[in-house]
Image (cartoon, rainbow, N blue to C red):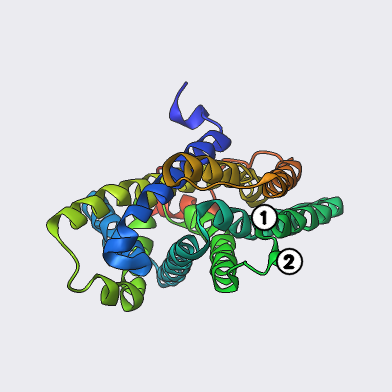
Amino acid sequence: MSTREVPGWMFAVVAMSVLQLGAALTTSLYPLVGAAGTGWLRLVGGALIFLALVRPNLRSFSRSDLRLLILLGLVTALMTIAFQFAVLRIGLSMTVPIQFLGPLAVGVIRAKSGRQALWPVLALVGVVAITQPWTGTVDLLGVGFALLAGLGWALYIVLTQAAGDRVSGLRALSITIPVAAIAATFVGLPEVWGNITPLIAIQALGLAVLMPVIPFILELVALKRMTTAAFGTLMAGEPALAVLFGSLILGERLDVLQLLGLSAVIVAGVAAARTGQRSTAIPGSLRSSERSGKPATD
């Protein structure tokens, strides 16, 4: 089977598995360089890798494409830093189910069936069961960061598909990740300053391969082969993977009610994900780039 014959959902599943593994391992840097510093170092590492791989020529991008990629970079920075702060305060197992409300909303908004409006309600009930606000112990700031990360994730899905349609291959990531790294500098560098060591730099570079290099490449491919509705709701598996890696690596535990809430979130995502594959026909903008002699490969 060639790469082009592999369905988009396979790329998406591998991407979210690598992403959650990286998210769990990343917490090891929190005591050393802080949450924002950790996110910033990963973005810097990812930026260096993509720049080395692609060596983008800014003159080869149209102004409209550059504006889109810069916007995507800013959204990526928002999603990354908000996620790190959320995990620091409420843990990976609780952050990801809340963050998942973002892509689920994308799936429902883009879906053709009005009945899918029921699934966000079920997911919201699940999130309430996970956070258990009636206990008075919920970290509202941590939940707020998780919701902000969810908003960033939703915007990321929409903008990444648009970028994937208009810019070929890894060229989009060679712009968006450096932009994200620059944007995150304002909150990340102050935490890292004076604490960085060669060992931490090597760790950050290795984590950058897991987050964002491998997942973002796979997601870019997946979004070119799937509808945003299918991709956004296929991410229903992310909360389960977050709990798995949170338990195995971080020692996090959910009680019975929280596990039931997690199940509700997953069921909502799986039910909403019943949409078809996206056509893989080359968009008009890429056909134009082929006529002008620019590459338009995956």
Against 256, residue 124 (above or below) is below
Instruction: Report x, y in % for residue 106.
Output: 67, 58
The answer to whether one can see residue 92 in this image is yes
Rendered residue at 71%/43% (across/down): 263
Rendered residue at 36%/63% (across/down): 39
How busy is the neighbourhood of tag 2: few (under 14 within 10 Å), some, or many (20 plus)?
few
Q: Which label is found at residue 22?
A: none
Rendered residue at 66%/60% (across/down): 131
| 46 with respect to 219 (left or right) | left
At mark 2, the secondary structure is helix
- As drawn, the residue found furthest toward the right would be 115
Against 258, residue 280 (above or below) is above
| Separation (CA) of disc 1 from disc 2 | 11 Å
At mark 1, the secondary structure is helix
How busy is the neighbourhood of tag 1: few (under 14 within 10 Å), some, or many (20 plus)?
many
The kind of residue on which mark 1 rests is Ile
- Residue that numbered label 2 is attached to: 134
Instruction: Report x, y in % for residue 212.
Output: 38, 52
Instruction: Report x, y in % for residue 14.
Output: 48, 37
Q: Nearer the viewer, residue 254 or 178?
A: 254
Q: Which of 275 and 126 is in front in this view?
A: 126
The number of numbered badges drawn on the structure is 2
Q: Which label is found at residue 130?
A: 1
| 149 with respect to 236 (left or right) | left
Instruction: Report x, y in % for residue 177.
Output: 35, 61
